[in-house]
Amino acid sequence: MKELIRHIVSHLVDNPDQIQVDEIDGERTSVIELRVAKEDLGKVIGKEGRIAKAMRVLISASSSKDRKKSVLEIIE
């Protein structure tokens, strides 16, 4: 899951070396924390949050195979 997010975001931002993706696994839920450079934050969120929502849909679809809920948090 981490690599999927890293791959998507690396094509969106100007500073791909500042991408940090952490995954916190729980029993039923997995939280994926995404940090990018401050100037790239708008590019990752997108207009009206469309890009962030699309990434959350992809994560949700991928994690349903494992019967686990995954949540994407974009941290400033």
Image: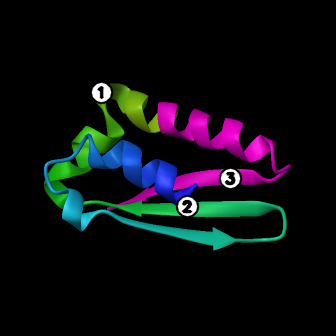
Mark 2 closeness class: few <14, some 14–19, many ≥20 residues within 10 Å: some
Q: Amino acid at mark 2?
A: Ile
Q: Is residue 74 above or below residue 9?
A: below
Q: Marks 2/1: CA distance?
A: 21 Å
Horizontally, residue 57 falls left or right of residue 30, namely left
Q: Measuring 29% from the left and 49% from the top, which residue is drawn there?
A: 10
Q: Which residue is mark 3?
A: 70
Numbered badge on residue 32: 2
Numbered badge on residue 67: none
Numbered badge on residue 47: 1
Give residue 1's position: percent from left, percent from top.
58, 54
Stretch of the chain drawn in magenta: 54-76
Mark 3 closeness class: few <14, some 14–19, many ≥20 residues within 10 Å: many
Q: State if disc 2 and disc 3 touch (CB < 8 Å).
A: yes
Nearest the viewer among 66 and 71 is 66
Question: For the C terminus, which image quadrant?
Answer: bottom left
Q: Is residue 57 above or below residue 8?
A: above
Q: Nearer the viewer, mark 3 or mark 1?
A: 3
Q: Marks 3/2: CA distance?
A: 7 Å
